[in-house]
């Protein structure tokens, strides 16, 4: 009998075990990314119907162990304890089985039904490992299946095992023998735990964790009625045991687990003596070479941004044409009025100019996904760690910082891999200085309008480079002033190089682009309408002269060919004056004195203020402002409009790019900082320091440039 | 003076005799499989001299010399 209720399955495994690929294979597009309550660890869920059985699959964070030292590990084990999934599927890298089994035995200790899935079987076989699945199955008493995730082989077999195991409802107890001395301690603590009622953890596991000095479990026990007394007993037993065995129980127990795992490994894996270096090692001989490593790293970064800029330009041109055509069509087919203005200028103009930059953003995420999925990201951290540490950061900080080039939101969320609070906070604060993809539209617009094509790549590169240099400088300052102290231990797996699958790259690009477009769809639309309103109202303003009678006079005096340019000139003057008197104009004029020394006028002031909503809004705001000052029936391209503005010189454009790079992170990022730090203090601090830094740097650029005669 | 992991040269191997240090740092080292009796091989040092990359239990791990200095090495071998 097949049960009809939905079966929940939790996927657990080491980082780099191919867990996410298998999750994608199982669920396809039917997945949802959210957050665990209270923390910012991403929660990925998906659905699958297999042979009439509904499966709800949770992709747990990838972990090496289940200690309380890392948020990911706590989240992973709490899902298993609190949500009691019907089944755990532990994905293991078959080519790296020994360390992967270390997590498996810790999962088994949680006393939940489990299936072992040996991934990357092909890689293991190529490496000369012979795995005996049925023997492993007998040893652990749980189903074992093999699969090749990145070729989508064995997914059905895994699902069949999952359905069968969930229908069987059998759990075979699993116990590791920690040796007489530790077992005696476990027994003593277990006895003390008997006094507690309503314990949701398995008792032996709880006793083990308490002996391991696990802070999360200690807190949970302390909260229980009578928990304090138990903790006193635990403390005494732990101290006694430490003396007897000569080291901390958690270390001795970890050693026991590895010893156990080692025995299992030797029994069930036939590995001929292989001291030869793997393919990955040979690749690394070049990529992390003592001399070539850093130049290769910088070369890859440089290539990434040039591809984004030059290749992205091609489809960008097509989209630009399409948006222009749509705006013109609407304008041609609608009666003149406020609705047409809202639609053509506010909505199509605003959202259109953001969608235009989607190709660049897709390419950037393609690059980032390639770096991550091939395994180069870890090498980047390896070659950069010495540099990152010099400024008080961790090689791992490099990864969120690199993600910051895509979007600061995942970057800041990615800092959760940093266990040390100081490392994490400094990385959060400097991540927004990495130029995110939302700022790219601003640069590409300004570069295309004010710089020759031959300089485009170099200008873009220097803007990104400035962000990096300042991030380093600020990290050093924050580390010294705000978070003096040690950095976390640097222990990072260097995963084998992999050929990334098209599917996982596409899913990655899709996910991130949807995030970007969602922002474009909601935030930017709202901002565009607001900006449209601010630039078009109040509707009736008092002009300096009577434009209507002036136009009537021109029409009367001259014949049509002569009158046309004069009328156009009058229209421009009128529109510009109207904008200057609008709410937006009033606000821009209000802040103008503060930004004048940076070379900005009120128009840029309006753009910068509205772009706090999201940095790409600067483009749509400028589009609205400049099309409002533009009277030609076919909307002129924004680049041309900017280039035609005499206030706008290349130096001003550069100053504006610097300011856009550095000033306050967008609202979404401020919201994430608030959530990650659980305090309003840090987003407020981030807002203030970055805006002050932006002002200072733009001041230097503009005043310095002016003094040099640019 | 006991020999520690950070004193091995690229290509040299050794067997871990003990992990010193305290608290979460030590736990992390042990969790990654660096327990007494484990054979390690130094792959290389990063371009700027630190961190280092080792091979242990069939996988590659990078760690800083500061952490490697907590790992005492008993038997050492030549290039393998």
Image (tube, coloured by chain):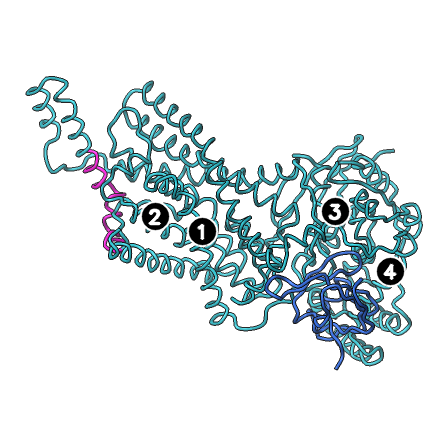
Chain colours: A cyan, B blue
Neighbour tally class for label 2: few under 14, some 14-19, many 20 plus, Cα within 10 Å: many
Whether residues under marks 1 and 3 lie with C-beta atoms below 8 angstroms apart, the answer is no
Identify the element where label 2 is drawn.
helix
Magenta residue check for A584: yes
- Residue assigned mark 4: A262
Q: Where in the figure is residue A387, as x and y percent of width and height?
A: 55, 63
Q: Which residue is mark 2?
A: A608
Closer to the chain start, of discs 1 and 4, is 4
Q: Position of residue A41 (x, y in %)?
A: 62, 53
The crowding category of the residue bearing disc 4, from other C-alpha atoms within 10 Å (few below 14, some 14 to 19, many at least 20), is some
Between marks 3 and 2 in the image, the one whose residue lies nearer the viewer: 2
Earlier residue among tags 2 and 1: 1
Q: Nearer the viewer, mark 4 or mark 3?
A: 4
Q: Quadrant of residue A51?
A: top right
In 3D space, how far apart are the residues under numbered discs 4 and 3 (Cα atoms)?
A: 26 Å
A263 left or right, relative to A459: right
Element under disc 3: strand
Label 2 and label 1 in one chain: yes
What mark, if any, has residue A464 been given in the picture?
1
Residues at badges 1 and 4 in contact (C-beta under 8 Å)? Answer: no
Q: CA distance from mark 1 to mark 4?
A: 48 Å
The residue where tag 3 is placed is: A10
């Amino acid at each position: 009998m097949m049960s009809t209720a939905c079966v929940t399955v939790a996927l657990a495994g080491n980082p780099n075990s191919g867990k996410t690929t298998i999750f994608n294979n199982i669920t396809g597009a039917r997945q949802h990314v959210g957050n665990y309550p209270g923390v910012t660890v991403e929660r990925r869920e998906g659905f699958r119907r297999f042979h009439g059985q509904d499966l709800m699959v949770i992709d747990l964070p990838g972990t090496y162990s289940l200690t309380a030292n890392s948020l990911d590990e706590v989240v992973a084990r709490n899902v298993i304890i609190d949500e009691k999934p019907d089944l755990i599927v532990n994905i293991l890298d078959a080519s790296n089985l020994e360390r992967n089994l270390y997590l498996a035995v810790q999962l088994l200790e949680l006393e939940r039904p489990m299936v072992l899935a040996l991934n990357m079987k092909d890689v293991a076989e190529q490496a000369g490992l012979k795995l005996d699945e049925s023997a492993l199955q007998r040893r652990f008493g749980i189903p074992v299946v093999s699969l090749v995730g990145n070729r989508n082989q064995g997914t059905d077999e895994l699902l069949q095992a999952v359905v069968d195991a969930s229908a069987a409802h059998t759990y075979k107890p699993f116990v590791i023998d920690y040796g007489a001395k530790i077992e005696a301690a476990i027994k003593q603590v277990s006895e003390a735990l008997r006094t507690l009622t309503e314990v949701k953890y398995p008792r032996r596991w709880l006793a083990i964790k308490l002996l391991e000095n696990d802070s999360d479990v200690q807190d949970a026990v302390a909260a229980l009625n009578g928990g304090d007394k138990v903790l006193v007993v635990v403390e005494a037993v732990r101290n006694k045991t430490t003396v007897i065995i000569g080291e901390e129980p958690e270390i001795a127990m970890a050693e026991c687990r590895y010893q156990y795992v080692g025995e299992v490994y030797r029994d069930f894996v036939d590995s001929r003596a292989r001291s030869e270096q793997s393919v990955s090692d040979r690749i690394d001989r070049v990529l992390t070479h003592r001399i070539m490593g850093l130049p290769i790293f910088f070369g890859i970064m440089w290539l990434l941004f040039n591809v984004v800029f030059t290749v992205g330009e091609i489809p960008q041109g097509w989209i630009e044409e399409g948006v222009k055509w749509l705006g013109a069509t609407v304008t041609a087919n609608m009666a003149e009025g406020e609705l047409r203005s809202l639609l053509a200028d506010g909505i199509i103009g605003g959202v259109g100019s953001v969608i235009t930059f989607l190709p660049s953003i897709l390419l950037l995420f393609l690059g980032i996904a390639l770096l991550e999925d091939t395994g180069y990201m870890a090498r980047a951290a390896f070659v950069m760690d010495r540099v990152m540490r010099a400024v008080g950061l961790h090689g791992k900080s490099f990864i969120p910082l690199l993600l910051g080039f895509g979007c600061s939101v995942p970057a800041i969320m990615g800092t959760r891999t940093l266990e040390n609070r100081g490392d994490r906070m400094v990385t959060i604060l400097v991540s927004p200085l990495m130029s995110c993809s939302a700022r790219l539209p601003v640069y590409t617009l300004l570069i295309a309008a004010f710089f020759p094509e031959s300089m485009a790549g170099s200008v873009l590169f220097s803007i990104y480079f400035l962000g990096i240099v300042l991030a380093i400088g600020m990290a050093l300052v924050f580390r010294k002033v705000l978070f003096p102290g040690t950095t976390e231990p640097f222990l990072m797996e260097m995963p084998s190089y992999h050929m990334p699958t098209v599917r996982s790259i596409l899913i990655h690009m899709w996910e991130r682009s949807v995030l970007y477009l969602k922002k474009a769809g909601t935030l930017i639309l709202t901002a565009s309408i607001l900006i449209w309103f601010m630039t078009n109202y109040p509707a009736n303003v008092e002009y300096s002269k009577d434009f209507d009678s002036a136009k009537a006079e021109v029409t009367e005096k001259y014949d049509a060919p002569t009158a046309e340019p004069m009328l156009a000139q009058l229209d421009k003057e009128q529109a510009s004056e109207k904008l200057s008197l609008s709410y937006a104009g009033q606000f821009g004029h209000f802040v103008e004195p503060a930004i004048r020394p940076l070379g900005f006028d009120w128009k840029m002031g309006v753009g910068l203020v509205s772009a706090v909503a999201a940095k790409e809004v600067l483009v749509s705001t400028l589009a609205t402002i400049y099309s409002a000052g533009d009277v030609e029936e076919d909307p002129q391209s924004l680049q041309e409009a900017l280039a035609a503005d005499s206030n706008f010189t290349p130096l001003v454009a550069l100053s504006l790019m610097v300011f856009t790079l550095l000033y306050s992170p967008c609202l979404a990022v401020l919201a994430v900082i608030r959530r990650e730090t659980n305090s309003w203090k840090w987003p407020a601090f981030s807002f203030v320091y970055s805006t002050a830094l932006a002002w200072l740097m733009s001041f230097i650029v503009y005043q310095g440039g002016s003094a040099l005669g640019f | 003076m006991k020999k520690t992991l950070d004193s091995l040269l690229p290509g040299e191997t050794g067997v871990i005799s003990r992990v010193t240090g305290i608290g979460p740092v030590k736990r992390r080292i042990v969790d990654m499989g660096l327990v007494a009796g484990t054979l390690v091989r130094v792959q290389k040092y990063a371009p700027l001299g630190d961190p280092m990359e080792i091979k242990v239990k069939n996988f590659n791990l990078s760690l800083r010399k500061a952490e490697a200095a907590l790992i005492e090495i008993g038997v050492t071998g030549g290039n393998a």
